[in-house]
Image: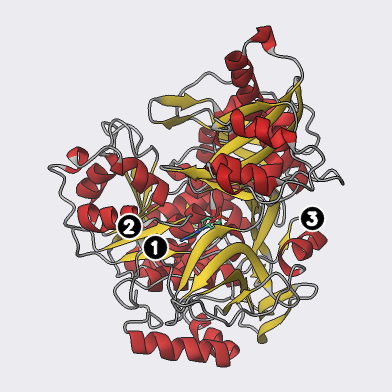
């Protein structure tokens, strides 16, 4: 496989960038020629950010799985598509070749069909990181069903909300999942999520942990039985086939729920053609992928990073993607390095929080591990501090691997701002330059472009994008107005990212973090309103306010101020634990506050609005600079909160 659109020099980057902005249709139309289409497009791009409406490759027909699998079979059928590393290092590694992937995806598409799944139906996938998760995702794409993968750490209540929002009729899950020394009972969580559910007709259960599960007659079926049956249907005389559904370029490929500053998580919808192009293009360029390289993205497929850079990006490029079931610290903190050594990993893509957490174990876990196969390192999910950047560079990359700092979001489908490994310059803790086709702009509160730099030549503002790139979200599922409100209404004719950023005189961007009420905890996006809703569901909680504060490992920690009615047994510690249980039940363990401070009141304006600015300052420990508190309804409450700070 060759990538004629792979950028190999800074000059070429500049030329391609210019062309992509001046003639986007010619630029992307040309790149699209490198994919397999059932029918080519009538028009490359049609858009406005008012409605918003964005359509790429109008009139084109394709199936993304033919691009990710079938087109590689003739020349690379026996090459590894997925290398699977189990949670337990003693267990057998599984190598899934493109031929095998083809067979399993065809089989699973047949299973879905046998169970009544049709094009456009929503299939929720709640599984651990096993190859079967990849078969499930791609099986959906093959028959044109819309997959909605839910991270294995979300609670039954969160799943129930997502099932309802998507009106999902099918679920694919596992009996359980291994993560470190834990077995997580996924099917039992699904059973809880289905209490009162009226839409789900079938649940397909893959056996991973042999945890006993309840199987409801007529609804629950075993993956293994279904696959065995389907094998005879898709394989005749040794030839495997399951015709891929013909999809329109703009047909939805998947929904992925993500947190915003208000309300419940929203279902971000990505399309087929634009998303395919973008994940492939950014994979090939940012990571400078070369055929045969082993790419190890440590994310979970429950998040966008896993969708784009474990599955669709690498597979559409005929690459080899390493999929890891476990966690970086089990059986010990050398696990990533063992994996790099064992599988001769060439590209390692992980999150700053993982790097910081591994830094905490010192250099001992790196001793004796051969990391010489590594060529390129990447980070994603949150700003990377310089200390972590240098540690990664020095101790993992041994000073010879370019580090790509990739800034992007669930809504953007793939990287928007990032250096290209070894091609465009890196700058520690800066995401640097936009990808071709991406036009970032920094604006002030009123939406005016900020052009004035400070004495260091730095411009500061809210990060927006001026024009659509192929993988921009198309809508939020079932509620297009919400999509408009969230991303396109803050500033006219701009996509608003929710992030603040700096820009230097060379045009490099540094992302400083969210400017809305969204937290980034260990690279996971969590809305403060969501956590408050969960806290307020606890019987004793009268009111609460949640803010972020700097956390050495997690990037941000969650600080909750809680007005409490009645203490359980008059015991503060027990009450805290009770409250954490409630949050775990309502959202999942990732949303548990790190600190809960009991207060008798919250700082509010006379109109009843909580002054989060003050609470944020207190949580950050900056109690000396609280600003003007005289407009508060009850200024005394601030003194009390400062005194009780945890
Ligand atoms: O604040 C930015 C931060 O993560 C947010 C997006 O989160 P999510 O949709 O979960 O996607 C994460 C994986 C793409 C952004 O709004 N973020 C992501 N990458 C970076 C980052 N902040 C700084 N630097 C990055 N490289």
Query: Label 1: few (<14), some or many (≥20) within 10 Å?
Result: many
Screen quadrant of the C terminus:
top right
Callout 1 touching callout 2 (CB < 8 Å): yes
- Please indicate, yes or no, whether residue 201 appears anywhere in the rendered image: no
Q: What residue do we see at 45% from left, 59% from top? A: 309
State the mark number for residue 389. 2
Q: Which mark is residue 429?
A: 1
Q: Secondary structure at mark 2?
A: helix
Residue 519, percent from left and from top: 59, 48
Helix, strand or loop under label 1: loop
Can you name the residue that lies furthest to the left here?
368
**Mark 3 to mark 1 CA distance (whole Å):** 37 Å
- N-terminal-most mark, 1 or 2: 2
User: As rendered, which of 519 and 375 lies closer to the eye?
Assistant: 519
Location of residue 34 in the rendering, given as x and y in whole percent from the top left corner? 46, 80
Q: Which mark is residue 478?
A: 3
Residue in the image at 69% along x and 46% along y: 612
């Amino acid at each position: 496989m060759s990538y004629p659109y792979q950028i190999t020099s800074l000059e070429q980057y500049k030329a391609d960038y210019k062309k992509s902005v001046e003639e986007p249709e010619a630029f992307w139309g040309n790149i699209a020629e490198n994919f397999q289409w059932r029918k080519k497009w009538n028009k490359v791009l049609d858009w406005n950010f008012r409605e918003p409406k964005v359509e790429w490759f109008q009139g084109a027909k394709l199936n993304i799985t033919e691009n990710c699998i079938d087109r590689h079979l003739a020349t690379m059928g026996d090459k590894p598509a997925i290398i699977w590393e189990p949670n337990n290092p003693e267990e057998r590694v599984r190598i899934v070749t493109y031929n095998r992937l083809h067979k399993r995806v065809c089989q699973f598409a047949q299973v879905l069909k046998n169970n009544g799944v049709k094009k456009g139906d929503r299939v929720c996938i709640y599984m651990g990181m096993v190859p079967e998760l990849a078969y499930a995702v791609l099986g959906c794409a093959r028959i044109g069903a819309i997959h909605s993968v839910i991270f294995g750490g979300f609670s039954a209540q969160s799943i129930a909300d997502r099932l309802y929002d998507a009106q999902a009729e099918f679920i694919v899950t596992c009996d359980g999942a291994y993560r470190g020394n834990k077995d997580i009972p996924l099917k039992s969580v699904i059973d809880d999520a289905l209490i009162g559910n009226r839409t789900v007709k079938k649940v397909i259960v893959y056996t991973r942990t042999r945890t006993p599960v309840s199987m409801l007659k007529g609804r629950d079926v075993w993956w293994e039985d279904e696959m065995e049956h389907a094998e005879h249907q898709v394989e005749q005389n040794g030839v495997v086939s399951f015709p891929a559904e013909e999809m329109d370029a703009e047909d939805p490929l998947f929904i992925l729920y993500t947190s915003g500053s208000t309300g419940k998580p929203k279902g971000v919808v990505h399309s087929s053609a634009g998303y395919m192009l973008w994940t492939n293009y950014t994979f090939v360029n940012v990571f400078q992928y070369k055929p045969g390289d082993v790419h190890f993205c440590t994310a979970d497929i429950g998040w966008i990073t896993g969708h784009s850079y474990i599955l669709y990006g690498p597979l559409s490029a005929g690459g080899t993607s390493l999929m890891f079931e476990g966690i970086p610290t089990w059986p010990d903190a050398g696990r990533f390095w063992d994996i790099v050594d064992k599988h001769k990993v060439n590209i390692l893509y992980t999150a700053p929080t993982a790097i910081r957490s591994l830094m905490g174990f010192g250099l001992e876990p790196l001793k004796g591990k051969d990391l010489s196969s590594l060529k390129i390192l990447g980070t994603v999910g949150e700003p990377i501090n310089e200390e972590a950047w240098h540690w990664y560079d020095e101790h993992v990359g041994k000073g010879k691997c370019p580090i790509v700092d990739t800034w992007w979001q669930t809504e953007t489908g793939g990287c928007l701002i990032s250096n290209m490994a070894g091609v465009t310059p890196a700058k520690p803790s800066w995401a640097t330059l936009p990808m071709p086709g991406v036009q970032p702009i920094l604006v002030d509160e009123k939406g005016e472009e900020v052009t004035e730099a400070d004495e260091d030549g730095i411009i500061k503002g809210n990060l927006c994008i001026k024009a659509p790139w192929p993988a921009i979200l198309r809508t939020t599922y079932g509620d297009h107005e919400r999509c408009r409100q969230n991303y396109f209404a803050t500033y006219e004719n701009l996509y608003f990212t929710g992030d603040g950023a700096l820009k230097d005189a060379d045009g490099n961007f540094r992302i400083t973090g969210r400017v809305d009420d969204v937290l980034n905890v260990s690279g996971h996006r969590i809305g403060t309103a969501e956590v408050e809703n969960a806290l307020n569901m606890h019987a004793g909680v009268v009111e609460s306010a949640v803010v972020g504060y700097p956390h050495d490992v997690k990037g941000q920690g969650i600080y909750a101020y809680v007005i409490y009615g009645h203490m359980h047994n008059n015991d503060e510690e027990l009450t805290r634990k009770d409250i954490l249980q409630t949050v775990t039940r309502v959202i999942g363990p990732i949303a548990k506050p790190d600190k809960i401070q009991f207060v008798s009141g919250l700082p509010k304006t006379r109109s009843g609005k909580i002054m989060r600015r003050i609470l944020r300052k207190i949580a950050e420990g900056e109690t000396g600079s609280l600003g003007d508190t005289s407009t508060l309804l009850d200024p005394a409450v601030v003194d009390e909160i400062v005194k009780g700070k945890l």
